Image (cartoon, helix red, strand yellow):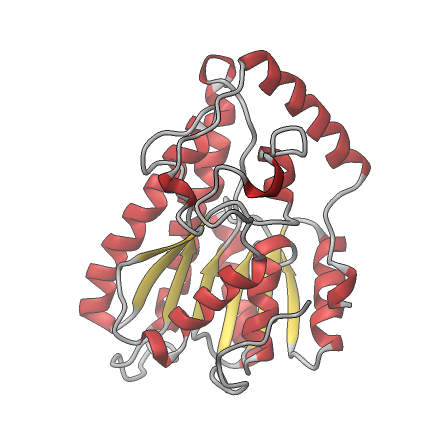
Amino acid sequence: MAMESPFKADVLKGKVALLTGGGSGIGYEISYQLGLHGASVAIMGRRQNILESAVASLQSHGIPAIGLEGDVRKREDASRIVESTVKHFGKLDILVNAAAGNFLVAAEDLSPNGFRTVMDIDSVGTFTMCHEALKYLKKGGPGKDLSNGGTIINISATLHYTATWYQIHASAAKAAVDSITRSLALEWGTDYDIRVNGIAPGPIGDTAGLNKLAPEEMRSKDGEGMALFKLGEKWDVAMAALYLASDAGKYVNGTTLVVDGGEYLSQPRILSKEAVKQLSRVVERRSRAAPAGIPKSKL
């Protein structure tokens, strides 16, 4: 059943948003909801086929949208995507950093290269995109009035609030993302009136992340052990993004909003290392056989 938005349909009218990882999962839902509420949308990703499907879906709902292929780990790609967005739509108001990498692995089995890859995507990639977008988020671009600047939303997680089994790489990366959010909120909020906030989703149903990190074999029935006894929905995260991107959140800065129903407060379930290895192999086979795409409900 489709949820009805509590926001006015034109709450982001005239805004331009760029989203990394905006072609699938939570990133796509945020793209979709920002577009439904008046924004023009540019999505960035590494897989051209996913980008094309996402753009076609967004455009079918009357949303001005473009897809731009690139890797957040490469500064030249980040610069090119930002410039292309501004060239196409004329400006940039909102940056959402949703690109991320993660997989289950015991720390002793994780290679330094694997650790570095996730850090590069999540934390270095987030900073790189923010850095390249800055000159346009200074309210419209170079030479413009620097008051009333743009908005940045960094998608984080709750992994590092205590500790999380078999995700040391992603936990470290998201801790860095939260630190980036606070530091940029302080500096760029003061200097340029740019608001920088984060969203930390919990387990969200029907996402590649949940299928990879909590496959069916791991999930408790009927939300057992979860604070609200249910999985969150991508819509929940997108509504948080709408709040932060709109004037409703105009005095919110440097905050990471937890959207998990209080799940992070509960005790984590413990798996054996052998179980993690077996599940990782299962997930890898599934991933190769059926890559994530756009839900039929959005087409």
Q: In this rendering, is residue 197 above or below 193?
A: above
Q: Nearer the viewer, residue 47 or 166?
A: 166
Which residue extends farthest right? 289
Where 27 sits versus 94, above or below?
A: above
Q: Percent from the top left, x then y, of residue 202? A: 47, 47
Q: Position of residue 48 (x, y in %)?
A: 72, 54
Pick whichever, 39 or 128, lies toward us. Answer: 39
Quarter of the image with the C terminus is bottom right
Q: In which quarter of the image is residue 281?
A: top right
Q: Residue 269, image x and y in percent? A: 48, 27
41 left or right, relative to 237: right
Q: Residue at x 33, y 73 (%)?
A: 249
Q: In this view, does 124 lie above or below 272?
A: below
Q: Which residue is drawn at 46% across and 12% down?
A: 108
Q: In which quarter of the image is the N terminus?
A: bottom right
Task: Name the residue at 23% across, 67% down.
Answer: 189
Pick the front one: 221 or 166? 221
Report the side of 170 relative to 35 (left or right).
left
Residue at 56%, 49% in the rendered image: 231
> Residue 58 location in percent, x, y?
69, 71
